[in-house]
Image (tube, coloured by chain):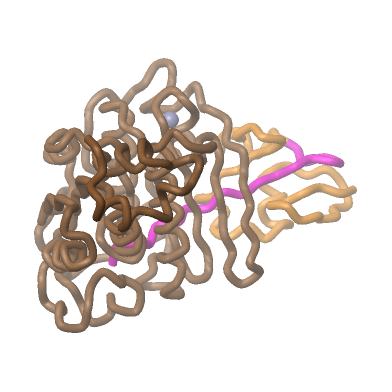
Chain colours: A brown, B orange
Amino acid sequence: MSLTNEQLERYSRHIILEQVGGKGQEKILSGKVLIIGTGGLGAPAAMYLAAAGVGTIGLVDFDVVDLSNLQRQIIHQTQDVGKAKVESGRETIAAMNPEVKVHTYNEQVTAANIQDIIRDQDYDFILDGTDNFPAKFLINDACVLLKKPFSHAGIIRFQGQTMTYVPGEGPCYRCVFKEPPPKDAVPTCRQAGVLGVMGGVLGTLQATEALKYILGAGQLLTGQLLTYDALTMAFRKVKLPANEDCAVCGKQPAITELFDYEPPTCKLRNTRVG
Amino acid sequence: MKVQVNGEELVIEKPVNIKEFLVLAKAEQPEYVTVQKNDAFVERSKFEETFVEEGDTIEFLYFMGGGSR
Ligand SMILES: [Zn+2]
């Protein structure tokens, strides 16, 4: 693949970077990133990855745009209220960078479909932008079992956290957080609120990790949990040891196939969290 | 006796076990927090037998969902 004149101009600020260059931009253009959840985290991540020229972007979401989403889910516009989030996301990306191929999955990830979704385009990197723990653990387990790298992130109120899993290079999400807390035990954004910009900060960090992974540049957040407190403007990195006893990535894993913590349902909207 | 909790110094009078320390250090939702002592995870089943002593570094790692809706 060689870059066209238009691409040379569009991506000129990337290409001038020592760690990117023409070769790196070509890697980005052939990169494939799956974004699960097009909300507070996934919206800014998808936009930056599309702008960066990531060639294939998968969007997974089963929800429709709600007026209360617009305070932070910047890929969706006022006129999109009521529209499927993946469709709204596709339109925003198309307007921003028409050369990005967008694959949409208008469904909830479950043990039954997540492997097929990841395999659909053989995605290089997965970005967890979901709002609930059953989904976060499912994404973790699927990525461990399929040996796919992924970025975890969570946000609440004025706080956020993120870590990156790369197979064989450090702990997974389950190494740190063994299993989901009981339903409704840990407050969600819907219950506790979240400053809209938190998704921008954490989602953009996730997009940064995806790009670094594709480029092979710098050090990823493997074996580290980055936490961010917007009230004190403090970023901290906590070292995470690998956990040999981890139920999915440990030496003798108890989890060898995927399962759902909550029965999947299409009517989650009445009981939804996040 | 000084210990570090999530990067901040905390002074405690005497060594206490993790279960007591969670209260002293005002951990949020102590029943769900992941605890690290000096870069190693402490199993929840070992909270009572594991003590926090002078110079220890403790991290509380919290569940954070958020994101999609
Ligand atoms: Zn693990």
Q: Is residue A103 left or right of residue A38?
A: left
Q: Is residue A112 left or right of residue A75?
A: left
Q: Main secondary structure of the magenta part?
A: loop
Q: Is residue A56 left or right of residue A181?
A: left
Question: Residue drawn at (12%, 50%), measured in percent from left and top?
Answer: A103
Question: Residue drawn at (20%, 62%), measured in percent from left and top?
Answer: A93
Question: Residue drawn at (42%, 66%), measured in percent from left and top?
Answer: A200
Question: Residue drawn at (46%, 54%), measured in percent from left and top?
Answer: A205
Question: Between A70 and A248, which is closer to the camera in this rendering?
Answer: A70
- Residue A197 percent coordinates (x, y): 45, 72
Identify the magenta region: B51-69
Q: Is residue A175 above or below residue B64?
A: above
- Residue A46 percent coordinates (x, y): 29, 57
Q: Is residue A55 above or below residue A98?
A: above
- Residue A186 percent coordinates (x, y): 43, 60
Q: Residue placed farthest to the top in the image?
A: A252
Q: Is residue A274 visible?
A: no
Quarter of image, ligand 1 = top left
Q: Is residue A23 magenta?
A: no
- Residue A229 percent coordinates (x, y): 59, 64
> In the figure, residue A260 lies in which quadrant?
top left
Q: Is residue B61 magenta?
A: yes
Tally of numbered tags: 0
Q: Is residue A29 visible?
A: yes
Quarter of the picture holding the C terminus of chain A: bottom left
